[in-house]
Image (cartoon, rainbow, N blue to C red):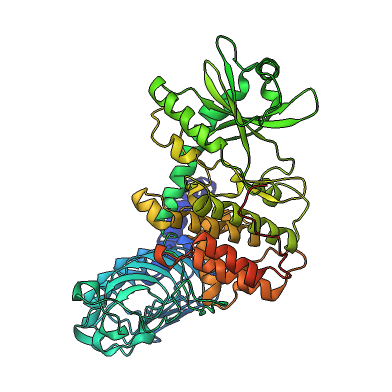
């Protein structure tokens, strides 16, 4: 009988036990604890401070970084500064109704400030400085009537300062410096009490507080904080630790980068890689060779014969403009052959005229276009073959490291090639696609600029040809991303990014930047605010000279300015490199004439 009763009771007792566990667990964590666990979930990584935040705890009051009211057990302070926290700020922090201090500064937080923080009506202090936060400052912060301190400095906030902050009449400390804020600083309410130090480093701001007249005032805007903006002044420019470069590292821009990288990969797979599957070049049925100025000392018959032997085994590269083959002649001379899809008839004639112009441009720091082949299915452009490969390969794919002198020499050569295109050749050319894969190296690791003129030549064609390729958007100037209009100054910006890539050994959209909501310009931006800009240098680079490095960083900072008018010309860049960076400076380093 007892045994039967125990058999009957066992399932019931198990049910009671499980019910107790469920009820106990559901009541284990408080309302504030749930909000903090949501914050923990949004954090991708940290130094381990959140590891002991456990849902089975009765409350969060003993968690590291959390302070509670002793009587009510409600969270009053969340202090997690300097803990390498990477992730976004959970909107559930807005459920901490009795939170008085929010201190998350000096971390790696990205994304936007959730508007729900405006619900924390008892907040006295907010410290979010020195992160990678972006987007606009939420107007809901104006609801925090008790707020006394607000520090949002050294982030990537954009847009205007919301007028609602003027209603924070208890505000004693305000710091929104070193961001990308624009427009007139509201002068209503408490905002009229703050001075330049609260807004420093936002080059798009204007207003009485910073002695900067707004354009709609009918007067010219002159910034008393930056007397050395004239790019043509001689000597080395000194930059402040709060100089900010570009607003292109916002989350929106990064999404655009990801989208375009995806599109570039699609184009490569569809139109680049598929070319390599052809067993041979189709140069039969009326193909002809056009040679520029006797640059190809071979008969058309000999060249066509060699072209017919090319297949996927001869491919040495692929990109947005087409597939590149290695063409070896019988006498040992080697050329690079770039295959571009066939144009329509009307555009074909225009294309040939433009190629004649490009073939006439000769300079020691430009890759020489020797001629082309008209085939039934494509254009085959014949260039000099450079045995050093691309700068992209040298920086990112080879085990041999480039030392300091080699890197300076490459930067100098690329600058001179680009300066020649902008200022000395006729007609002048805007490259539009400056990046490390378009800088080729000869046997002595001297740089040559390649693919000049092709971006403009192909941009209006309705075929699959496009300048949008994976990686390109890491080099594009902010105004080019917005308008699509290329200028000499957009090339200068791309060159500045190239300099940072050579210095750091990292691609402009390296995964370590994307995780933090940045690109390489945003990383430099952060390092400058910390006065740690020298840390951008590749640790594997040997022979770095501090004085040259500082001068080169000053040049790069000017080149990647978010304001096109503040960027130097490429002639000016070459002058600065020769006078400030190159030590010693060889007398024959700059030659605007062709060899």
Residue with the most extreme right position:
331
Residue 535 is at least partly visible in this image = no
Left or right, 89 with respect to 507, comes to left
Which residue is rendered at x = 66% and y = 48% of the image?
A: 364
Q: Is residue 592 above or below residue 64?
A: above
Q: Nearer the viewer, residue 3 or 314?
A: 314
The front one of 369 and 328 is 369
Q: Taking 502 as reference, is 209 left or right?
A: left
| In the depicted structure, whether residue 542 falls above or below residue 306 | below
Residue lying at 59% horizontally and 15% vertically, measured from the top left: 282
Residue 161 on image: x %, y %: 28, 73
Please say whether residue 165 is visible from this viewpoint: yes
The x and y percentages for residue 489 are 44, 58
Q: Which x, y percent locates residue 207?
A: 26, 80
Residue 107 rendering spot, x and y as whole percentages = 51, 72
Quadrant of residue 370 within the rendered picture: top right
Dividing the picture into quarters, in which one does residue 140 lie?
Answer: bottom left
Looking at the image, residue 240 lies above or below residue 284: below
């Amino acid at each position: 009988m007892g045994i039967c009763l125990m058999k009957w009771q066992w399932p019931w007792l198990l049910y009671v036990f499980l019910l107790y566990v469920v009820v106990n667990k559901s009541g284990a964590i408080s309302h504030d604890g749930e909000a903090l666990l949501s914050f923990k979930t949004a954090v991708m990584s940290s130094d381990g401070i959140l590891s002991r935040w456990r849902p089975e705890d009765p409350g969060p009051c003993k968690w590291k970084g959390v302070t509670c009211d002793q009587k009510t057990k409600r969270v009053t302070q969340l202090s997690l500064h300097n803990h390498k926290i990477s992730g976004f700020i959970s909107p559930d922090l807005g459920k901490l109704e009795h939170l008085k201090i929010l201190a998350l500064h000096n971390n790696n937080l990205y994304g936007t400030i959730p508007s729900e923080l405006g619900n924390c009506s008892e907040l006295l202090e907010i410290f979010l400085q020195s992160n990678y936060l972006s987007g606009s400052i939420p107007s809901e912060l104006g609801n925090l009537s008790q707020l006394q301190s607000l520090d949002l400095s050294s982030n990537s906030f954009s847009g205007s300062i919301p007028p609602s902050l003027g209603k924070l009449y208890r505000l004693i400390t305000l710091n929104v410096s070193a961001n990308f804020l624009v427009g007139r600083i509201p002068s209503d309410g408490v905002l009229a009490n703050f001075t330049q130090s609260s807004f420093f480093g936002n080059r798009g701001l204007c207003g009485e507080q910073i002695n900067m007249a707004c354009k709609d005032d009918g007067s010219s805007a002159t910034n008393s904080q930056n007397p050395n903006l004239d790019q043509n002044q001689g000597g080395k420019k000194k930059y402040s630790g709060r100089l900010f470069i570009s607003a292109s590292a916002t989350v929106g821009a990064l999404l655009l980068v990801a989208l375009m990288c995806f599109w570039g990969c699609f184009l490569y797979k569809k139109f680049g890689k598929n070319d390599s599957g052809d067993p041979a070049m189709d140069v039969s049925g009326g193909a002809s060779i056009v040679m520029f100025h006797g640059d190809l000392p071979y008969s058309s018959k000999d060249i066509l014969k060699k072209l017919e032997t090319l297949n996927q085994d001869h491919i040495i590269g692929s990109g947005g403009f087409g597939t590149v083959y290695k063409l070896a002649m019988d006498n040992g001379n080697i050329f690079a052959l770039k295959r571009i899809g066939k144009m329509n008839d009307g555009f074909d004639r225009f294309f040939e005229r433009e190629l004649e112009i490009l073939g006439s441009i000769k300079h020691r720091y430009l890759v020489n276009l020797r001629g082309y082949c008209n085939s039934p299915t494509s254009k085959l452009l014949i260039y000099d073959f450079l045995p050093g490969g691309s700068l992209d390969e040298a920086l990112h794919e080879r085990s041999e490291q480039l030392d300091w002198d080699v890197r300076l020499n490459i930067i100098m050569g690329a600058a001179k090639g680009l300066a020649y295109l902008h200022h000395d050749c006729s007609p002048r050319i805007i490259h539009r696609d400056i990046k490390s894969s378009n800088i080729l190296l000869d046997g002595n690791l001297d740089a040559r600029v390649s693919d000049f003129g092709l971006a403009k030549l192909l941009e209006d064609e309705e075929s699959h040809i496009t300048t949008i390729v994976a990686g390109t958007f890491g080099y594009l100037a902010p105004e080019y991303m917005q308008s699509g209009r290329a200028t000499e100054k957009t090339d200068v910006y791309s060159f500045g990014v190239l300099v940072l890539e050579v210095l750091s050994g990292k691609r402009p959209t390296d995964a370590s930047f994307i995780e933090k909501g940045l690109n390489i310009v945003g990383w430099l931006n952060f390092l400058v605010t910390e006065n740690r800009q020298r840390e951008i240098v590749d640790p594997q680079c040997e022979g770095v000279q501090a004085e040259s490095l500082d001068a080169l960083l000053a040049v790069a900072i000017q080149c990647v300015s978010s304001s096109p008018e503040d960027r130097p010309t490429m002639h000016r860049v070459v002058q600065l490199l020769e006078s400030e960076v190159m030590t010693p400076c060889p007398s024959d380093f700059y030659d605007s004439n062709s060899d």
